[in-house]
Image (cartoon, rainbow, N blue to C red):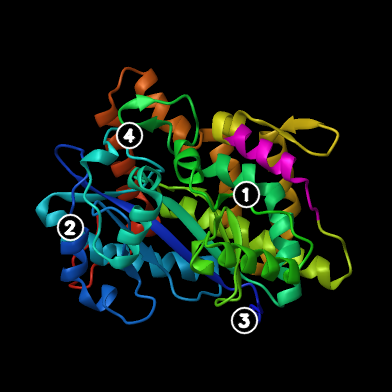
Amino acid sequence: MGIAFEASERATLGVEWELQLVDRDSRHLRQEAGRLLAELPDLSSQTEAPPLRHELMQSQVEVVTGICETVEEAKRDLAGNIARMRGVLEPRGTVLTCSGTHPMDHWREQRLSPGERYGELVEQMQWLARRILTCGVHVHVGVRGQAKAIPIVNALAKYMPHFLALSASSPFWGGYDTGLASTRSVVFGSLPTAGPPPNLPGWSAFEEYLETLLRAGTIASIKEVWWDIRPHPDFGTIEIRMFDGIPTLREVGMAAALSQSLVELFDHQLDRGYSLPSPPSWVVKDNKWRATRYGLDARVITDAHGTTVPLRDDLYELVRELTPVAARLGCAEDLDLISEILDKGASYERQRAIVSQGGTLQDVVDLLSAEFAADPACATVGVGDGAGVR
């Protein structure tokens, strides 16, 4: 089976941001996705790639950028559509938030979104799919050539704990602290074709692997391969799906900058004949668990001999290494937000701090709502009718 990779001319960006619809007063999720999409038909009814879409549950939506050249362009794209959404939602007491899981609500209380695709997913996966009350951020980065795609996927697997720990935002599940930094990575990772990407030697091996899965009936199409990092042949991108739900647009910009800078670095290293990192599968799997459990406090494995280093130290070094690349891409300021997160805490740490100081999970939801609403990247964009966004 041949799979054509529609190579990009440069490291373009696309971002998919999954959001929660939350009642301002009760702090519980509201099943309003269908109504929201119906009231914004110009955003949701395009025949191809609408910027506003259903997710599995009616209490969630996904906002998607077009093809962007820079992180700043991607943030503007997201902010404009979020402003439109807030203009519809806020008058009736619904606010937008984002975290890997809702701190209080249970998946049994949710209604599934309409659509044949979702019905088929639940029929096939049953309980595994029904409980996916999770949100994430997916970042697409353009790659200049089919032959580069799999080596870059393998190299990015080294940074899976970095992606996850920086964005980890799901310490609570159904009203309880799970003890994990990212509960979402466990819930979504239980799907049969989810999890770390297999370490493959090249594009032909990828084609053979997908053909085997199709022949065996494991998947019906390539779209059902939900690896944490995967090539997207139709878009000519690498899609990084490791990020937990990210509560602010500034942090989404950080995730996009980190993704774009790494792919750009690896793309040019291949041009210069360098060999990219390709960690063994057991190292990748173990490091993902370490970040899932301990977040930024994890010690990550750096070689096949089991050497470990503090993830925080590795992230400081990574920022230093990538800053020249990010400067050329125009996203050095977005990348530098990593240093602020290391200093002030990732979302899972900020949420737990509320509870440790005597707050409730309702207060945690208020924190997530306040962070989303106060994000200056969103607040600077006006609603389409001219009203300001708080």
Disc on the earlier residue, 2 or 3: 3
Label 2 or label 3, whichever lies nearer to me, is 3
Q: Which mark is residue 6?
A: 3
Q: Look at mark 1 in the image and give the residue it sits on.
A: 196
Which quadrant: the N terminus?
A: bottom right
- Residue occupying image coordinates x 77% and y 31%: 308
Q: Is residue 371 above or below residue 72?
A: above
Q: Tell me which segment is drawn in magenta.
A: 277-291
Label 1 or label 3, whichever lies nearer to me, is 1
Farthest residue to the left: give it: 92
Label 4 packing within 10 angstroms: few (<14), some (14-19), many (20+): many
Q: Position of residue 321 (x, y in %)?
A: 76, 52
> Per the image, is 286 magenta?
yes
Q: Is residue 71 above or below residue 315?
A: below
> What residue type is disc 4 on?
Pro
Q: Look at mark 2 in the image and give the residue it sits on.
A: 89
